[in-house]
Image (cartoon, helix red, strand yellow):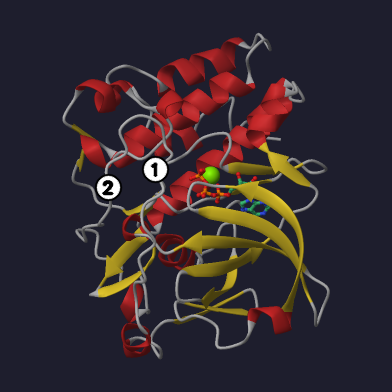
């Protein structure tokens, strides 16, 4: 899958972290400085990947952030840090910058290399073939107590949850957004990434084109076909499937399908579409094996109807 030693994506890799009990938000813990330059250097040569002519790599940038970007405005607050927009001084490109505290529970160890989870997952997802519905990372900067991850900033955009709350969706837009979300999540699994926190706040929608970008890989885990232990679920409570509530373990793709069904249900609330209702009900089947697979979803006549 990967020509990046640091990201060889062994699916049996364990991910350190603390279990989230109720909601998706972790308690802010003590700030802990993590990787030193030595660990990074070990993998410097192998960790580079090329994507859309932007050099992306698992190594932090050796530039000075302030010399490359001019910070603009606040975009959002997350559990691990803050997101703001910035402009690249050399070409005027607008980017989003996620500033993330270095905490014990937001790292992923790959081949003995402990790196920030957002960085590991986004770098993995940018390997060929890429997906237009997953946010791209351009580069990242390392500081003693936090990192800054520079990503594409799709604009004009808003969180899907805002469109739902403001009732801005009709059934066709709902179908288009859902079909893209299915492709985005399948792309993650195909690239060895289990997102673990699919919800309407982690999907950005371009308000002109209704194209989406899946964001927020801070809770993601390396995908394994083995069942995950219940206490490794890090998704939102509202999107938690029954087997996580009452069972001991859960399956990655079946959990994602449930979460996608929940998103579809929320998007189509009040829209009265029988086909849509059929699909979100099926995705949220109590028994995970009754839920459609991603292959079934891609063949769904309503969701991917021929133009
Ligand atoms: N690339 C981006 N472009 C524009 N806005 C973004 C981008 N990434 C994040 N945001 C905004 O910042 C918010 C927080 O980002 P994100 O979800 O990645 O943080 P988080 O700390 O992991 O949050 P949480 O775990 O609480 O969901 C998003 O909900 C979104 O509004
Ligand atoms: Mg988020």
Mark 2, residue position? 18
| Mark 1 residue's CB less than 8 Å from ligand 1 | no
Q: In this rendered view, identify the residue nearer to me: 235 or 291.
A: 235
Q: In this rendered view, identify the residue nearer to me: 295 or 20.
A: 20
Residue at the image point whose x is 32% and y is 63% from the top: 108
| Mark 2 residue's CB less than 8 Å from ligand 1 | no
Q: Is residue 183 visible?
A: yes
Quarter containing the N terminus: bottom left
Residue at the image point whose x is 67% and y is 10% from the top: 270
Q: In this rendered view, identify the residue nearer to me: 133 or 71.
A: 71
x, y percentage for residue 291? Answer: 35, 25
x, y percentage for residue 292? Answer: 38, 28
Q: Can you say whether 127 is above or below 304 in the image?
A: below
Quadrant in the rendering for residue 89: bottom right
Alpha-carbon distance for marks 1 and 2? 8 Å
Mark drawn on residue 26: 1
Element at badge 1? loop
Residue at the image point whose x is 57% and y is 15% from the top: 275
Q: Can you say whether 260 is above or below 61 in the image?
A: above
């Amino acid at each position: 899958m990967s020509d990046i030693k640091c990201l060889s994506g062994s699916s049996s890799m364990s991910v350190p972290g603390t279990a989230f009990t109720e909601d998706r938000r972790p308690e802010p813990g003590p700030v802990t400085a993590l990787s030193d330059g030595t660990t990074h250097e070990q993998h410097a040569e192998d960790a580079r990947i090329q994507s859309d002519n932007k050099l992306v790599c698992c190594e932090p940038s050796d530039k000075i952030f302030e010399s490359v970007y001019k910070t603009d405005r606040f975009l959002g607050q997350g559990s691990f840090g803050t997101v703001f927009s910035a402009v690249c001084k050399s070409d005027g490109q607008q980017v989003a910058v996620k500033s993330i505290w270095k905490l014990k529970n937001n790292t992923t160890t790959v081949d003995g290399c402990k790196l920030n989870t957002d960085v590991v997952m986004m770098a993995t997802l940018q390997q060929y073939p890429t997906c237009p519905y997953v946010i791209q990372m351009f580069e990242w900067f390392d500081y003693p107590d936090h990192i800054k991850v520079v990503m594409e900033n799709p604009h004009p955009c808003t969180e899907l949850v805002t469109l739902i709350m403001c009732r801005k969706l009709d059934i066709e837009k709902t179908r288009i957004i859902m079909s893209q979300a299915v492709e985005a999540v399948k792309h993650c699994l195909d690239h060895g990434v289990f997102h673990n926190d699919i919800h309407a706040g982690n999907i950005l929608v371009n308000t002109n084109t209704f194209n989406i970008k899946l964001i927020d890989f801070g809770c993601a885990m390396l995908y394994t076909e083995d069942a995950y232990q219940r206490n490794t679920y890090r998704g939102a409570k509202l999107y938690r499937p029954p087997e996580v509530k009452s069972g001991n373990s859960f399956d990655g793709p079946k959990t994602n399908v449930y979460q996608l069904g929940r998103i579809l249900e929320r998007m189509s609330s009040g829209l009265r579409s029988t086909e849509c209702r059929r699909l979100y009900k099926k995705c949220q089947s109590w028994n995970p094996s009754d839920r459609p697979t991603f292959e079934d979803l891609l063949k769904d006549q309503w969701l991917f109807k021929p133009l």
